[in-house]
Amino acid sequence: MEDKSNQAFLGWRMVVIALSIDFFAVGFSFQSYPVIQLLIKKEMGLSTLMTTSTIPAFLLLSSLLLPFVGKLLDVFSIRKVLLSGALVYGISLISLYFSFNFLTFILIFAIPIAIGVALLGNLSVSKLITQWFNKKVGRAIGIASVGVSFAGFVIPNLTHYLLFSMGFSWREVYFLFGSFILIFIVPLIWVFVIDSPKLVNQQPDGKNDKKRDTEDFSDSGVDWSIKDLLKDKNFWLLSLVFSLQFCSMMAVLAHIPFYAEQRGWESYAAFIFSMYAIPAVISKLVFGWLVERKLDPRAGVSISLLIQTTGILLISTTNSPNELAVVFAFFGFGLGAALPMSNILFSRIYTPKSFGRSRGLAQPMIVPFQVSGTPLAAFLFDLYGNYDLAFSLLAGCAFLGIFLVWFLRLPN
């Protein structure tokens, strides 16, 4: 391979690529669905519970795959894992064009799309970032995570435009999304992703001291076995805290379009949903920067959970679409920190060497709680005809995490 040691540090290129991959991996699957689900519900005559079951089913299989993906990332080429995921993901999105009943739709979404996103998604790109950064990993992960939140602003509005202004069907929209992945994202990964700075004679963070001890390289650290991880109290605490945060977050995101519809604001649903995204982008950058500036990451998690809790409780107090949009933006600032803070804590506690394994192993613990909030909220809505109790319970989940995170013991 060409010697690139005298070139500009390539780590920030990896951050931009990671941001782009996250944008489309999450955007085309998760962020587009709240808009499309309103059409699917009407076309197929589904209940709210059935309609909102797609994303939980998708997340459940993804979680079962992530320990395997984490092991792959710790052993094999990150670039090849990303390529495999992009190919599966693109083909699976295109296959939704041929789904003409809900069973076919949810099977495609919950199996091949879940496999593609598990290989292509945040775990893989976060592993890439931890290979390229050490001291600046908080900032780098924060910037890379912006893709997830930015997709939350762009993709719902793009989907709404394609459906209602351009006149595409939801099947044609998924066909376009899948084609984009195959035409643009696969070549992007193939040409530009580099697994490690050592492959191009560079060092993490762009350090120029070639005589620096090898322990500074980002693949150093403790090699945690699965058995040791399962015995570690920190592992279970991390899993529990982020289970509560993601449960609360995902359920509110899934149901806010239906809440807007219930209040008579259906035409504003895509706009309201997208309003969480820009504050979430800012949150990722702010919290990543603060952790790099020595903020205790446990404090960062507590602050984000407090904002998230307050935002959920304020939803039911709104009296107009604009008020709901403002409250949802505030909620977005709280949830935005969840992904980078979880990655930072796993990387700090278990070192970059075992990041993929520990983060991947945690997902089967996190996701059952994460997905439970969405059907629970749907059940309570169908039972009582409103979201008051559902949103109160979801706020309680986030509030509990504020205190639990302080039982974590961080390494010196």
Image: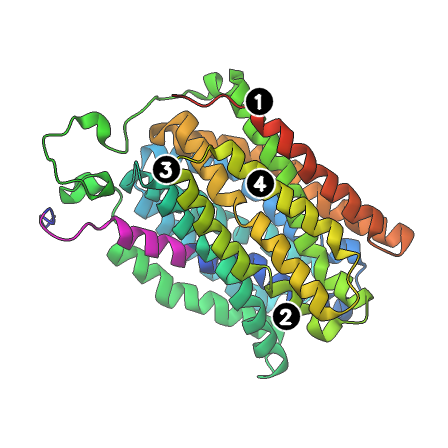
* Vertical placement of residue 402 versus 141, above or below: above
Counting from the top left corner in percent of width and height, residue 143 is at 39, 52
Question: What whole-number distance in Å separates the C-alpha atoms at marks 4 and 2?
Answer: 26 Å
Crowdedness near tag 2: few (<14), some (14–19) or many (≥20) residues, C-alpha within 10 Å? some
Which of disc 2 and disc 4 is earlier in sequence?
2
Give the answer, above or below, for where 4 lies relative to 230. below
> Where is mark 1, residue-wise?
407
Near mark 3 (Cα within 10 A), the count class, few <14, some 14-19 or many ≥20, is many
Mark 2 to mark 3: distance in Å? 37 Å
**Along the polypeptide, which appears first: circle 4 or circle 3?**
3
Compare marks 2 and 3 and give the one earlier in the sequence: 3
Find the residue positioned furthest to the right: 384
Q: Residue at x 57, y 30 (%)?
A: 239
Mark 4 neighbour class, 10 Å CA radius: few under 14, some 14 to 19, many 20 or more: some
Q: Nearer the viewer, mark 4 or mark 3?
A: 4
Q: Quadrant of residue 403?
A: top right
Give the left or right position of residue 177, taking residue 382 as reference.
Answer: left
- Label 2 – label 1 distance at C-alpha: 39 Å
Which of pointers 1 and 3 indicates the residue nearer the eye? 1
Write down the residue under mark 4: 303
Structural distance between the alpha carbons of marks 4 and 1: 16 Å
> Mark 4 or 1 closer to N-term?
4
Q: Is residue 383 left or right of residue 315?
A: right
Q: Quadrant of residue 197?
A: top left
Highlighted magenta segment, given as a residue range: 6-21
Q: Magenta includes 245?
A: no
Assess whether mark 3 and mark 2 are in contact (beta carbons under 8 angstroms).
no
Of discs 4 and 1, which sits in the foreground? Answer: 4
